[in-house]
Amino acid sequence: MSEQHSSEDQTVNLREHTEEGGFEKEELDILDLPPRKDVHEGKKEKTRWRINALWMRFLLVILLVLIIVILSYPYWDEWFGQPFPEQSIIEESPYHERITVER
């Protein structure tokens, strides 16, 4: 019963509003508007950058890896000093035969 009563109140309010001319669109005079410079003059706010938590984690990991690489630089020569086997092992088992041509 109260739902029916409230819907009747809404229709009465709506009819009164339309009779008063509440839903008519006003025409906007474009030539009467202020200059754009005056409207936007007070809006000198800085743009705020919002960074997602996922990007923050990614940047943190990259920063940590970079710090580890920089701090471990003096030890690279010890760790990666001789990555290939010695020359004597390579010369003992050649995969080709040396040929010399004389004229």
Image (spheres, rainbow, N blue to C red):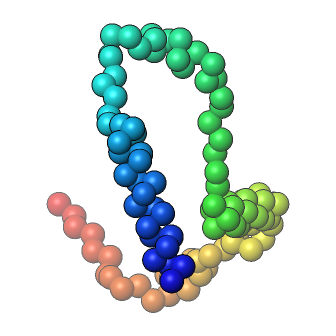
Nearer the observer, 41 or 61: 41
Q: Position of residue 96 (x, y in %)?
A: 32, 82
Query: Quadrant of the rendered structure where residue 30 is?
Result: top left
For residue 60, above or below residue 93: above
For residue 30, above or below residue 53: above
Q: Position of residue 53 (x, y in %)?
A: 67, 65
Query: Quadrant of the rendered structure where residue 77 is?
Result: bottom right
Q: Position of residue 12 (x, y in %)?
A: 42, 57
Name the residue at 34% across, 28% down. Answer: 26
20 with respect to 47 (left or right) = left
Q: Is residue 88 visible?
A: no
Nearer the observer, 90 or 34: 34
83 with respect to 95 (left or right) = right
38 with respect to 31 (left or right) = right
Q: Residue furthest left?
A: 103
Nearer the observer, 77 or 62: 62
Name the residue at 54% across, 79% down. Answer: 2
Q: Quadrant of the C terminus?
A: bottom left
Q: Is residue 13 visible?
A: yes
24 with respect to 50 (left or right) = left
Name the residue at 39% across, 38% down. Answer: 20
Query: Quadrant of the rendered structure where residue 28 is?
Result: top left
Q: So how many labels did they put on this image?
A: 0
Nearer the observer, 70 or 54: 54
